[in-house]
């Protein structure tokens, strides 16, 4: 049995178990690196590398920073802001819009996972106080955060498009991206996506309004709040400064320096521990261990798919199927949907790296604009919204909201479909492809 077939079987098995819900996702996720190591697909270091990655370290740091914020009075202070926004449906809509816009702004200047790890305590507090379904609010903000990254034509967005011009040049294509193209291409698509979620999609993310916690969880929270000693005014102020100050510094350092963001957060945590803003037990308790286990376990599957050649087999097979097709919409749509499907279970970087050169070669060979197929791959592979395995940002939303796999996936189909249709309509107009 070939390695690619073994990896495909493990992938399919993981999907079935996750959707079936027979065993906890964290336990099922841990089985993935075990199977990949036992079958010889990955070495010990490769199989378990996810648990020592900078992503896991960053998540732990961000979770503890959220715990520091929870120790302060900031979240309770938000009730005053929510009250000022007004009561009834009109007030709720204002709160939802504010939460989505804050998620968009944070994610524009930082990674989506950093944005949502910082935003989640605030989003949950806003939703609860406004009477919004917390699960739906979390998912709406997360999808916006995942899709707003690289909207503006600077930083990582500019780097991506410069790289794309290199791909086009290497393939012998005459077309090139201009400096402003990232903004022109992405912003209208994002606006339609944002408005759809705000007006329509938000209501369909989850059918049950469980207000985020079961009665048992709510009771535990009340006991924790009763046992928690209030901070002195000075420590309360310091906690707020450490949380928001470190968040601002993380954004600035990610833009202007190569300093890892978790270093900034770690310093803030050490200060908080030394100043007794948060205790060691409270810091450890604030870490979402299920999220760590699921991420660390499933990320090895991306490595296995890449090492075994499964990604290339899928991409080449799709390119062969499109060999006789010359319709630009069918070709671009097929590449978008294929990369979108794969990125729900593996790294979007891996999917993009495999599919980009193939999509350009296919377009050049068929005589169509390769920018269309290239951005189809770019947008399709970055639309990580359908499963918690798609990105650690969605994994945060899944665990924080208490979703099950079925409702998480079904509720995400509408926004993803709107995004896809908007891309297929807007791109030919924007770049005058046809």
Image (spheres, rainbow, N blue to C red):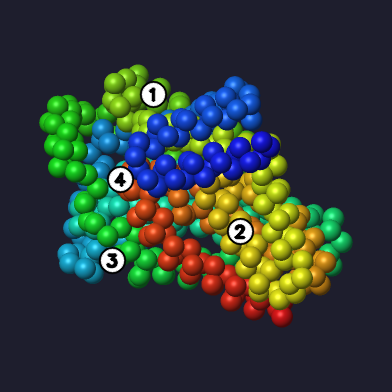
The residues bearing labels 3 and 2 have C-alpha atoms spaced at a distance of 35 Å
Q: Which residue is mark 4?
A: 402
> Could you say which is closer to the camera, residue 194 or residue 219?
219
> Which of the two discs, 1 and 4, sits closer to the camera?
4
What residue appears at the point 49 percent right and 67 percent down from the top-left corner?
Answer: 417
What residue appears at the point 40 percent right and 34 percent down from the top-left corner?
Answer: 26
> Which of the two discs, 1 and 2, sits closer to the camera?
2
Q: Which residue is mark 2?
A: 338
Callout 4 environment at 10 Å: few (<14), some (14 to 19), or many (20+)? some
Which image quadrant is residue 144 in? bottom left
Residue 6 is marked as none
What residue appears at the point 43 percent right and 31 percent down from the top-left corner?
Answer: 293
> Which of the two discs, 3 and 2, sits closer to the camera?
2
Q: Earlier in the sequence, mark 3 or mark 1?
A: 3
Q: Which residue is mark 3?
A: 93
> Horizontal and vertical percent for residue 412?
42, 59
The residues bearing labels 3 and 1 have C-alpha atoms spaced at a distance of 38 Å
> Which of the two discs, 2 and 4, sits closer to the camera?
2
Quarter of the figure that contains the C terminus = bottom right
> Horizontal and vertical percent for residue 65?
37, 33
Q: Earlier in the sequence, mark 3 or mark 4?
A: 3
The residues bearing labels 1 and 4 have C-alpha atoms spaced at a distance of 32 Å
């Amino acid at each position: 049995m070939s390695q690619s077939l073994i990896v495909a079987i493990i992938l399919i098995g993981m999907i079935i178990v996750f959707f079936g819900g027979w065993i906890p996702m964290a336990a099922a996720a841990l089985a993935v690196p075990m199977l990949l190591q036992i079958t010889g697909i990955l070495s010990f270091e490769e199989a378990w590398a996810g648990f020592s990655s900078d992503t896991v370290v960053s998540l732990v740091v961000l979770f503890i920073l959220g715990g520091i914020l929870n120790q302060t009075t900031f979240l309770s202070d938000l009730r005053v802001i929510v009250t000022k926004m007004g009561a009834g449906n009109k007030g709720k809509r204002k709160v939802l819009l504010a939460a989505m816009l804050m998620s968009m702004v944070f994610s524009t200047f930082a990674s989506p996972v950093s944005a949502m790890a910082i935003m989640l305590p605030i989003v949950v507090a806003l939703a609860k106080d406004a009477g919004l379904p917390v699960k739906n609010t979390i998912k709406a903000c997360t999808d916006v955060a995942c899709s707003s990254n690289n909207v503006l034509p600077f930083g990582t967005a500019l780097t991506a498009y410069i790289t794309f011009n290199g791909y086009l040049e290497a393939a012998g294509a005459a077309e090139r991206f201009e400096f402003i193209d990232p903004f022109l291409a992405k912003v209208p698509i994002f606006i339609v996506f944002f408005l759809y979620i705000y007006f329509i999609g938000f209501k369909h993310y989850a059918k049950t309004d469980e207000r985020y916690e079961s009665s048992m969880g709510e009771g535990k929270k009340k006991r924790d709040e009763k046992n928690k000693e209030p901070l002195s005014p000075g420590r309360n102020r310091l906690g707020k400064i450490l949380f928001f100050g470190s968040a601002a510094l993380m954004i600035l350092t990610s833009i202007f320096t190569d300093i890892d963001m978790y270093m900034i957060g770690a310093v803030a945590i050490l200060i908080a521990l030394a100043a007794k803003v948060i205790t060691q037990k409270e810091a450890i308790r604030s870490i979402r261990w299920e999220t760590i286990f699921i991420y660390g376990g499933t990320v090895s599957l991306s490595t296995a798919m890449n090492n075994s050649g499964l990604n290339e087999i899928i991409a080449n097979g799709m390119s062969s199927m499109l060999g006789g097709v010359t319709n630009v919409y069918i070709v671009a749509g097929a590449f978008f949907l294929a990369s979108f499907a794969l990125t729900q279970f593996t790294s979007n970087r891996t999917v993009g790296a495999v599919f980009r050169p193939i999509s350009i070669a296919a377009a050049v060979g068929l005589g169509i604009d390769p920018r269309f197929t290239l951005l189809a791959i770019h947008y399709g592979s970055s639309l990580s919204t359908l499963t918690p395995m798609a990105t650690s940002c969605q994994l945060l939303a899944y665990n924080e909201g208490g979703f099950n796999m079925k409702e998480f996936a079904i509720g995400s189909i509408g926004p993803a479909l709107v995004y896809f249709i908007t891309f297929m309509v807007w791109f030919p107009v924007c770049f005058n492809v046809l």
